[in-house]
Image (tube, coloured by chain):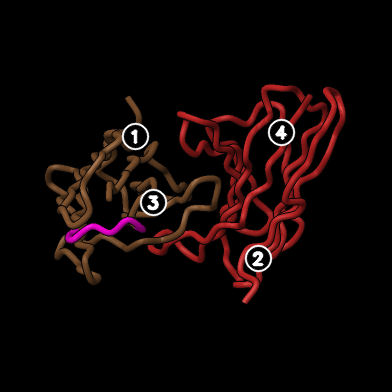
Chain colours: A red, B brown
């Protein structure tokens, strides 16, 4: 029962470094999402993929890129990390618009 | 105006009391509705789905009013373990839209 798996769980980056956050789901869900959560800001949508082969910007896409590698995997890339990207990142998936979403355990990213 | 709005709280409630949360959404085309619970620094987890007919799960009751575009959650006989942040969530087309959450502290 893996569900949604995110790697890594923790990461510290230096300003300007790049990294990719990985997300994989084994539930055959069509839609996948990346959110960031900051204190007092709630969950904010970065990018989403409604189906394999499509990606769209969310509320806060600047500084990020995504790849929907296949139906299972949806990665989030920071090309040049900035301290403002220090946050907790959550990946989620859902099968349809009428169902709940399932979340990964989160990646806690600190950019120094 | 945010598409999904909640009172951020915190609600400080004695153990055993009943507590109610409301949430409003602005887009009448929204298709499905949920309450999630989030514990500190953990991922959100589904508490319950919300329907116009209302639904109950033990001490929890949720209700959707489409005409007024609000969603409610009632917790009866609150327990210390109910302390968490409660997120109102709306699905609209390809998007999942979250309220900022309402913090609940149950006091012994």
Please determine whether, in this image, residue B3 is positioned above or below residue A15. Answer: below
- Number of the front mark, 3 or 2: 2
* Residue B80, magenta (yes or no): yes
Question: Both on one chain, marks 3 and 2?
Answer: no
Label 4, label 1: how many angstroms apart (C-alpha)? 23 Å
> As rendered, which of A11 and B4 lies closer to the eye?
A11
State the SS at label 2.
strand
Label 4, label 2: how many angstroms apart (C-alpha)? 21 Å
Question: Both on one chain, marks 3 and 1?
Answer: yes
Residue at 59%, 37% in the rendered image: A46
Residue at 53%, 53% in the rendered image: B43
Magenta-drawn segment: B76-81
Residue at 76%, 57% in the rendered image: A69
Label 2, label 1: how many angstroms apart (C-alpha)? 28 Å
Q: Looking at the picture, how far across and down is residue B97, in whole percent?
A: 42, 43
Question: Label 2: which residue?
Answer: A25
Q: Looking at the picture, how far across and down is residue B48, in whole percent?
A: 32, 63
Q: Is any part of residue A83 visible from this angle?
A: yes
């Amino acid at each position: 029962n893996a569900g949604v798996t995110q790697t890594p769980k923790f990461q510290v980056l230096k300003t300007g470094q790049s990294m990719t956050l990985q997300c994989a789901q084994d539930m055959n869900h069509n839609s996948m999402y990346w959110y960031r959560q900051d204190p007092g800001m709630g969950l904010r949508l970065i990018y989403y993929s409604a189906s394999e082969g499509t990606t769209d910007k969310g509320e806060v896409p600047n500084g990020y890129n995504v790849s929907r590698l296949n139906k299972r995997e949806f990665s989030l890339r920071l090309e040049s990390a900035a301290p403002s990207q220090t946050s907790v990142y959550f990946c989620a998936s859902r099968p349809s618009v009428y169902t709940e979403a399932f979340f990964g355990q989160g990646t806690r990213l600190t950019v120094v | 105006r945010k598409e999904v709005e909640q009172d951020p709280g915190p609600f400080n409630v004695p153990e055993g009391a009943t507590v109610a949360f409301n949430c409003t959404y602005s887009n009448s085309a929204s298709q499905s509705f949920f309450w999630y619970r989030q514990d500190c620094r953990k991922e959100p987890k589904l508490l319950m789905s919300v329907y116009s007919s209302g639904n109950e799960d033990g001490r929890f009751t949720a209700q959707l009013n489409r005409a007024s575009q609000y969603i409610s959650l009632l917790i009866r006989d609150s327990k210390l373990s109910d302390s968490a942040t409660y997120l109102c969530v709306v699905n609209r087309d390809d998007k999942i839209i979250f309220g900022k959450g309402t913090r609940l502290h149950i006091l012994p």
